[in-house]
Image (spheres, grey):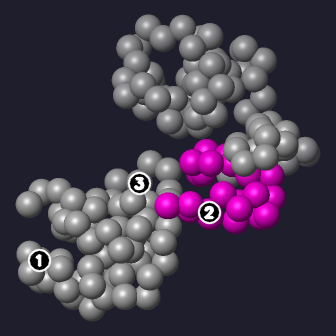
Amino acid sequence: MPTHIKRTIKPQHIVSLALVQHLSPSQIAKLAGVCRQQIWKILKQAGVSTNKGSGGATRVQYNCDFCGKPTEVTRARWRKSIKHFCCEECYFSSLENLGYHPWRQGQRLARAIIAQYFPIQPEHIPHHKDGDCRNNNLINLCVYVSQADHIKATHHKNSTIKPIWDGTNI
């Protein structure tokens, strides 16, 4: 997504941002440097439906990132996800990390190693970047403030959450 657009943006670019990248009129307005109402007018003139109407919210068609099955969801739901799935089965199948090696002592040992370099608290969450709990090299470890921050940083789109400690900085 472009970080800035000049005020001389062409209507076809605005339509592309709305229909291809699925940006909201508010997001497009920030990029274009104009008010949101101006974006609404341009989209309306181009024949792009921006209202929910009787049919509900605008829907986006896409292919499942796991199985490739065509499906659709609302535009707002599509924008919130990094990956898009047709069903829960595909979602959970995609979570199976082949590089993940569960090891009961992995987090405990990682905490002990991190404690030598950083004052880790009980609520802090150590994270193995490659998913292998047996790989406790410093460059593979980082620490998040909470489990919520850990999930947001590793699984959510456009997350600005950074670890409070990263082993690559040592």
> How far is the residue under mark 3 from the one under mark 2?
19 Å
Q: Quarter of the image containing the C terminus?
A: bottom left
Earlier in the chain: of badge 3 and badge 2, it is 2
Q: Earlier in the sequence, mark 2 or mark 1?
A: 2
159, 30: nearer the viewer: 159
Instruction: Please report contact status of discs 3 and 2: CB closer than 8 Å, yes or no.
Output: no
Q: Residue sitting at 81 percent across and 58 percent down?
A: 87
Judging from the image, what secondary structure is the residue with disc 2 in? helix
Query: Taking the image as drawn, is residue 3 in sight?
Result: yes
What's the distance in space between the residues labelled 3 and 1, CA to CA? 24 Å
Q: Is residue 123 above or below residue 100?
A: below
- Front residue of 56 and 95: 95
Q: Residue furthest bottom?
A: 122
Q: Which residue is mark 1?
A: 118
Check whether the beta carbons of the residues at disc 2 and disc 1 lie within 8 A of each other.
no
For label 3, the residue is 159
Residue 159, position in %: x, y? 41, 54
**Label 3 secondary element:** loop
Residue 100, compared with residue 60, is above or below; it is below
Closest to the camera, between mark 3 and mark 2, is 2
Report the residue marked by disc 2: 95
| Mark 2: amino acid | Leu
- Magenta span of residues: 78-99
